Image (cartoon, rainbow, N blue to C red):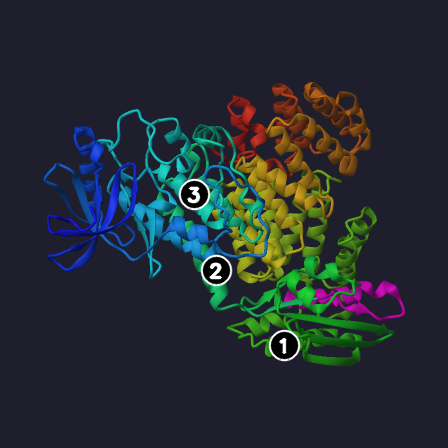
Amino acid sequence: MIGKTISHYRILEKVGGGGMGVVYKAEDTKLKRAVALKFLPAEFTGDPEAKERFIHEAQAASALDHNNICNVHEIGETDNGQMFIVMACYEGETLKSRIAKGQSRPERLPADEGRIGQAGSRGMRIEEATDLAIQIAQGLSEAHAHGIVHRDIKPANILITKSGVAKILDFGLAKLAGGARLTKTGSTVGTAAYMSPEQARGQEVDHRTDIWSLGVVLFEMLTGKLPFRGEHEAAMLYSIVHEEPQPISSFRSDLPPDLELSITKMLQKEPGKRFQDMRELLSQLGTKKKKHETAGEQALPSIAVLPFVNMSPDPENDYFSDGLSEEIINALSKLEALHVTARTSAFRFRGKEIDIREIGKQLNVSTVLEGSVRRAGNKLRVTAQLINVADGYHLWSERYDRELEDVFAIQDEISLAIVDKLNVRLLGEDKARLAKRYTESFEVYDLYLKGRYHLSTLTEEGIKRSLDYFQQAIQKDPNYALAYVGVASVYNVLALVGQFSSNETMPKAKSELLKALKLDDSLAEAHAWLGEVYLQYEWDWSSAEREFKRAIELKPNSPEAHQFYADYLIVTGSMEQASIEIERARDLDPLSNIPNTIFAYQLFVLRQFDQVIEHCRKMLKTEPSFLLQLHLWRALRQQNRLSEALVECKKLFTLFISREIAEAMECVDAESGYKSAMRTAAKKLADLSTKRYISPYLIATLFAHAEDDNETLQWFEKAHAERDMAFYSIGVDPDWDRVRSNPRFTALLEKVGLKR
């Protein structure tokens, strides 16, 4: 063909080929431009059906006028009857070639060579892969709007021009909505590695098959590998239909959780569980791109306030030095133009000799504030240094020798100095919010600091002492709003740790929070905790959302507010927004387990059990966690890995609930005894609940694992009556799928304002 002239097109070189045709670069001798000619293979020249499909491709593609779709100029036929399509010719490379080049990254990816479709490359940069995915999705959105499903989205069918524009090629397998297929009816078409499950089965497909294929392509862009594998095509198709994809986080650790979640949703085997159209997908990918660009172009100044060292002779004054650090964190957290690390993460470095640069790296901040406090009688000495993480130089330092009553002024001066040195622009009422005082009495303030310090211990004695200190503060200053929040937080903690039922504690917590907000409606902490009351106790969904949003508005750097809101979004089904809130909480509190626990639950709700197991085991290596242990046990059971589930369940009871109950399950270690072990634990826990408070929701969970539907529903009804703190999640929790269609369960859903 090279050198021949077909019509007014002179063939210059062959550039590619596939099952539906061979492509040549040619010169349009009339318009003096480069074009691409795609010829129907010669062996199909006498096949009327193949010709019809080829014509349909030209018609389908020519109907689409979009920047991310290759333009079709005309269709023609040679003298010997061979069909060809004339398309625009672009200088660039295929996405397949671009993925093969990859992006050198420090992480070592697991070796997995010699399998079908496995590139040896590393993944592309996140922003580049996301940008290309957006462009491809935009082109497919246009095709879908015209009733055209591509059905063969793969890297070889995407061209990237020299200017970085993605062009979708080859509509040879396209299906017209409500019209003719471009392939034989009942045939399995497409490229095996990128087929959706319904496509692999030879079933009817719609636009959601392109969403699946784009998910595979995005996975491959980010990792250089495919989510499904097999030694041959049949094995590949089996994997697509029957197996879960390999977690993308196992290939690269720098992937934002919300992007990982989007890919997970694109690769749901049931079309109804994927994004339902390209517009929905574009909304999520666009949010991620915008957020990344904002972070890259206008990085906020950032700071971690380390716990001030207690230099006083009396170690009992730890509460005071901690309190001073916390107050500075709280003040700075109200500023939207400053990124402030949460107390939980910053206080992890207490008493540790660690290089400032390493602290900055772990907390992802550019500056660190450290200091010391010496308290002797009525005298107070505070030193503070603001340090640049990059080079260790002091940006600012000061020493304050004052009276105890001057502690408020010291906090204000330190906060304002930080704002000045970091060039944080104060808007509107920011300065007033930064230096706001909630009491003028040092004695009242001191009691409040003691209450908060002892509450953080989470011991029975510490919680009891904290309540006493908060109540003393209120007695001395009934207008001290923060002390009411302190009392409410004690009641919340008592319910969360399971010492009391929520019926005993949550009405009291709500009463205290309303008192606080009556005194000062600008308290973000009060709004956040009130949202928890509405969510977990009253099941007032709209009020909960209102309070969480108000808390974030008042205190953008509050990890608690973002965490609470993420939890609300998960149980109400807004998964993509939940991912954004979880990521924000992680940014603010990178060393805390709480955002990771919420992320694990989100994966559990989405039925991504492989990822739940991997994530929980990774996090539990660093420290024990009741909720992570709970999610690990339940995810293993969902996968029918019963012997492993039993091990993790016994570990949960041993570490957090009752060693005796764990020992009672020892006699039924075999897989066949899992249900028996769960029944044993449930009955013993039910007996224990007559002596002290035990969550009926947990007992219902054990009976559900024992597959005793009647007992499950009975304890569920008890959990509803007692307004169990976990009951608000029944609408999405996979553990209840077995009884979800039962009328008794449906009635409970209606009682909490959830639809079936």
Mark 2 or mark 3, earlier in chain: 3
Asked which quadrant contains residue 368, the reply is bottom right
Give the percent coordinates (x, y) of residue 345: 68, 58
| Between marks 3 and 1 in the image, the one whose residue lies nearer the viewer | 3
Q: Secondary structure at mark 3?
A: helix
Establish if 354 lies above or below 633.
below
Residue matched to label 1? 416
The residues bearing labels 1 and 2 have C-alpha atoms spaced at a distance of 29 Å
Specify the amino acid type for callout 1: Leu
Residue matched to label 3? 215
| Between marks 2 and 3 in the image, the one whose residue lies nearer the viewer | 3
Establish if 433 lies above or below 143.
below
Q: Is residue 733 left or right of residue 279?
A: right
Mark 1 or mark 2, earlier in chain: 2
> Which numbered circle lies on residue 292?
2
Magenta highlight range: 306-331
* Crowding at mark 2 (Cα within 10 Å: few <14, some 14-19, many 20+): some
Q: How many marks?
A: 3
Q: Nearer the viewer, residue 573 or 59?
A: 59
Specify the amino acid type for callout 2: His
* Crowding at mark 1 (Cα within 10 Å: few <14, some 14-19, many 20+): some
